[in-house]
Image (cartoon, rainbow, N blue to C red):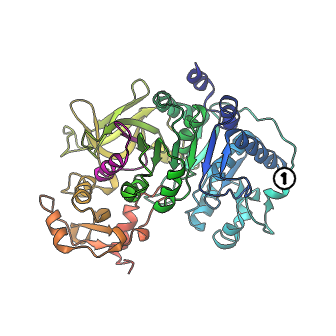
Amino acid sequence: MFLQRIANNGIRLGTLFDRAAARFPANFVVLDHDLDCAPGFGRRVTVTELATLVDDFAARLWAARVRPGDRVVLHKSDGFDIPLLAVAVARVGATAVLLSPKLDGATVAELVRRVNQPYLITDQDKLDHHLPADIAGRTQGVLLAAGRHERATALADLAGAPRVDPVTMSPDHPVLITHTSGTTGIPKLAVHTNRTFQARYRPQASVVRLIDKREPVAMHMSFVHSRLFTAMPISLLQGHPLIMLRDDEPAAVAELFTRVRPGIVETHPNTLLRWEVLADDPRRPLAHVKYFSSTFDAIHPRTVATMLRASERRNPRYAQIYGQSEVGPVAARTYTDRHPFDGRCVGMPFPGMTGVRVVSRDGNPVSKANPGFIEVRTDGRILTYLGEHPRWQKQVNDGWWRMGDLGYRTRWGCLHLLDREVDRIPGIDSTLEIEDKLLGRLPELIEVIIVPGSGGVPSPVVCTRDDLPLDGARWQAALDGLPALGEPVQWRQRDLPQTATTKIKRLELARLLTAREVPS
């Protein structure tokens, strides 16, 4: 009955914390940082306190003349107050546009232009050091989440504004706009509604409700990613305590997970890779984890095996979820430590909720050697790309959405993902599969990315733990049985071009290699 009410009304982002507080008033959220908007708020708070804070934020936005139908760009320093402010924006009937703190000022200015005279919520640091001087002229007004600035109104100055009732908008009205990863250029702006979020909520909520409510859920993901706005409601509305991480530094994570032991962990694949060292931490910070999950990018089998080994729970599981910002999750499967993880197998569609097909590129049957275009059908698909509707239309084929990935389905219907279309290298079935094998054979590697090199020879870029020099003999031994690769180029992991969800920008990396712009 509860899921049916969600289906009829959409996820109703603006009243999320009110409804969670009504069901589980004493449930708590643990943070690893202070909120810029409320620095004295504390790091362990109840859902009821968060509901009150969101109500206060909404009152301040109303006092700043934000009204139903307005658009509000959120681009500020990283923190959990980003989703809290987004919920407050939805509460007054406006549409939040979330831009990653990692975006450069020129990109932010271009995206603000596309939004067409929105309000902008930012902070003093962004205005002083990152955003162009004319940014205020592209907006209806600039609001500061922290600090003071002559060209902006500080939200702190609006404290005590009269509270306002939440505004109910149509389930099909845009409630949130997020941006795509930007791995191939300027990010696109994806338009979501309460109803499209609801369609993404249903398949996951039906699974999560089978998990004991006492299991704390730890999340480390981009605070501007659409995934957060389905993962967070699932946990809150089903009564799970939340651990919201801003930073993924292993030492800090280990300390927090030792104090508040999560039963479920969801984060980016590259973050789990970075957390492999936690498996050998004597405090056993991952010992209580029953379920690991990631949905943002391909994950390596070595990382999955390491996470499952770190758990001391009976039959721990890793959930492989395949999806995209534009459509949400569309396929999934789980693995245990008794079943070897296949990094290319991303699972089966959710019955009655999502559909998947693979279309031939050349008229010949689709197979591993001749992968096809992966297309999906789901009610969770975005309405459009803001300001770029023709670009959105190019990816829709009779109701099917082209994911931009290449793969095939097995005789049992399981979907296998081999590569992104733009990352395909002639003569190689799957660069991702080769990367999986190299990471499995060389524990000292913490990242390997294969991109097109000069003369058409695939070029591997490698990162080692603690940036130690790569052992040439071990590298050569690891290449046994693999396609011919160029000489490895060693980088520091922090120097790799990355998106907000830590995906590697492969096209940008290939360009840097070609231009010989390799960090020393």
Image position of 299 with respect to 464: above or below: above
The residue that appears at 76% across and 35% down in the rendered structure is 167
Whole-percent x, y for residue 52 in the image: 76, 42
Look at the image and tell me whether residue 221 can be seen.
Answer: no
Taking 402 as reference, is 392 left or right?
A: right
Q: Nearer the viewer, residue 306 or 408?
A: 306
Q: Nearer the viewer, residue 476 or 355?
A: 476
Whole-percent x, y for residue 384 in the image: 54, 42
Q: From this viewpoint, which residue is outermost toward the front?
A: 282
Quadrant of the image containing the N terminus: top right
Please give the range of residues in magenta. Answer: 294-322
Residue tagged 1: 159
Look at the image and tell me whether residue 8 can be seen.
Answer: yes
Taking 470 as reference, is 250 left or right?
A: right
Image position of 138 with respect to 213: above or below: below
The residue that appears at 46% across and 46% down in the rendered structure is 266
Report the amino acid beneath label 1.
Ala
Q: Is residue 397 magenta?
A: no
Q: From this viewpoint, which residue is outermost toward the bottom?
A: 520
Image position of 166 with respect to 497: above or below: above
Whole-percent x, y for residue 207 in the image: 45, 29
Taking 121 as reference, is 234 left or right?
A: left
Taking 358 as reference, is 501 left or right?
A: right
Q: From this viewpoint, which residue is outermost toward the left?
A: 481
The residue that appears at 58% across and 40% down in the rendered structure is 241
Q: How many marks?
A: 1
Q: Is residue 317 magenta?
A: yes
Task: Identify the secondary structure beneath mark 1.
Answer: loop
Q: Residues within 10 Å of mark 1 (few under 14, many from 20)?
A: few
* Quarter where residue 475 is shown: bottom left
Quadrant of the image containing the C terminus: bottom left
